[in-house]
Amino acid sequence: MTDPQLVLAERVQQALGTAFGPEYATEDPLIRPSQFADYQANVALSLAKRLRRAPREVAQALLEALDTTDITAEISGPGFLNLTLGDDWIAGQAVRRLRDERLGVPRPAEPRTVVIDYSAPNAAKEMHVGHLRTTIVGDTLARTHEHVGNRVIRQNHLGDWGTPFGMLIEHLLDIGEEEALRRLAAGDGNAYYQEARLKFDTDPAFEERSRRRVPLLQGGDPETLRLWHEFIEYTKRYFNHVYTLLGVTLTDDDIAGESMYNPMLADVCEELTHAGVAEVSEGALCVFPPGFTGRDDMPLPLIIRKSDGGYGYATTDLAAIRYRIRDLKADRILYVVGATQSLHFQMVFESARVAGWLHDDVHAEHVQIGSVLGSDGKMFKTRSGKSIKLTELLEEGVVRAEAVIADRGYDPAVRRQIARQVGMGAVKYADLSVSHDSEYVFDFDRMLALTGNTGPYLQYATARIRSIFRTGSYDPADATGPIRLGHPAERALALQLLRFGSVVEAVAELSEPHRLCNYLFDLAQAFTSFYEGCPVLKAEDEDVRQSRLALSALTLRVLLQGLHLLGIEVPERM
Ligand code: ARG
């Protein structure tokens, strides 16, 4: 454990135990960054009332009990304990980090099986920016859990089943298989859906045919299933195209769409009925999970079998959660899905708890994803108001990125590759750097800015460190120190580098990628101050140069690793 904040927390806890008795040794020492020291412990203030002593007196007792090896401590203000780490300790830890391939990321005591449900576009409709965001956030969580050392099972819960497929298949027959499939693979799914919908609403014969097609699909009629299969295959091609463009880790093996659960739905209803969890109400089979009431205080039902015998979204999700627990052996299930579905998931989780599927050792969490807005503050569509094709939007990002990268006479293919990395990096970082449940405005100009908390800024900062090594003909792998901290900017940079492990751990624990973004942004800024104040290649003294090269090499590795966890590629040059 070398995270400075954790080291200090442990020290102060020891002191709490020594000064006030073992029952105080688990007290939160309230370590916070400080203006006048590296950190301050605020626990004396919170403890004073309980101990009926003056805060400064409590702080004094703590100070006397504190093991001050490698740190200096003093009391300030009303009873803060200011804590400063010794330069030698920081430098020593930084050198150890250089030799640690995990860069300080701790391994979990016991690896857990984490099922992550993300992306989940609907085969019948266009993938929109909302799905883009769940895809990007989910992918970072998957990468992070994997890196930490948990067993990750990705689940792409495709919307690939249900009544709309009746009309979608009939439309396919009307316009001809070939034409229909060509359009689906090209990502015209939305227009396709709208045409089918229009016919359904205006042409009674088409409506009738569509309705008759649904039981054929559900009953497994071979020709209907074949058409449905084709339909899904071609839509998947389009989704895969988007995933590849973005560098998302999802593959066809991760697809566990709604259709997969079809054979389990009747059994789920039976098990819930048998257990007394579900009951028939007005002809429909319902679960009334405790704690949910609608208007007029009536218990709110989760309908799992409609009165016509049909199953819906809730039934599929109950089958999915049971499958994830029983078959996939999940310890933790993350649902990276739009915040608007919050009530649905609360009710599904509560029902699963009542059914005994979820319990103290298996957790399900809805990682709520906020909406992406247009500059008008409404749901993001296009300027013209029609919904946009996602691939076109992403392509626009790539084209715009070309204008951001410097013209160094690159080969056009190389230039295009860099533009893709920068453009997609910008889009992804914008999704990741705000907390996942808040809304934000989709704005290419802001995302692509080379200054500020953006993807391109971090890519640029990383490329710049690489260029230091190139210019001096040094290999970062050879920069192993020793590290000496003379200048305050060197010290601040080293201290920041030591925080990486606990930040990654927090991202996995709390499902909050924006913490990693903020950390990397702070790190890049600490590097900039260091680079401005401390010449590296031009350092007079060879020892100083080696020390600064080592700090630069460690910064480079942390930035690369951090960006990799965010799924952001870094061009060699920018
Ligand atoms: N396909 C759904 C949608 O587009 C999202 C599915 C999320 N996952 C789930 N298990 N319900 O809204």
Image (cartoon, helix red, strand yellow):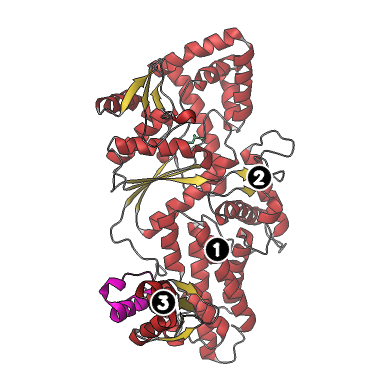
Q: Position of residue 450 (x, y in %)?
A: 68, 62
Is disc 1's CB within 8 Å of ligand 1?
Answer: no
Residue 374 lies in quadrant: top right
Q: Secondary structure at mark 3?
A: helix
Q: Which residue is mark 2?
A: 395
Residue closest to the eye, 359 or 530: 359
Alpha-carbon span between mark 2 and mark 3: 56 Å
Residue depicted at 57% across the width and 81% down the height: 489
Alpha-carbon span between mark 3 and mark 1: 29 Å
For the question of whether residue 2 can be seen, the reply is no
Residue closest to the eye, 411 or 476: 476
- Earlier in the chain: of badge 2 and badge 3, it is 3
Above or below, comparing residue 414 to residue 77 in the picture: above
- Earlier in the chain: of badge 3 and badge 1, it is 3
Residue 177 lies in quadrant: top right
Above or below, comparing residue 45 to residue 538 in the picture: above
Q: Which mark is residue 44?
A: 3
Q: Which residues are magenta?
A: 9-28
Q: Secondary structure at mark 1?
A: helix
Q: Secondary structure at mark 2?
A: helix
Q: Is residue 10 magenta?
A: yes
Q: Is residue 513 magenta?
A: no
The crowd level at tag 3 (other Cα within 10 Å; few <14, some 14-19, many 20+) is many
Q: Position of residue 395 (x, y in %)?
A: 66, 45
Q: Which residue is mark 1?
A: 518
Question: Furthest residue to the bottom?
Answer: 541
Residue closest to the eye, 206 or 548: 206
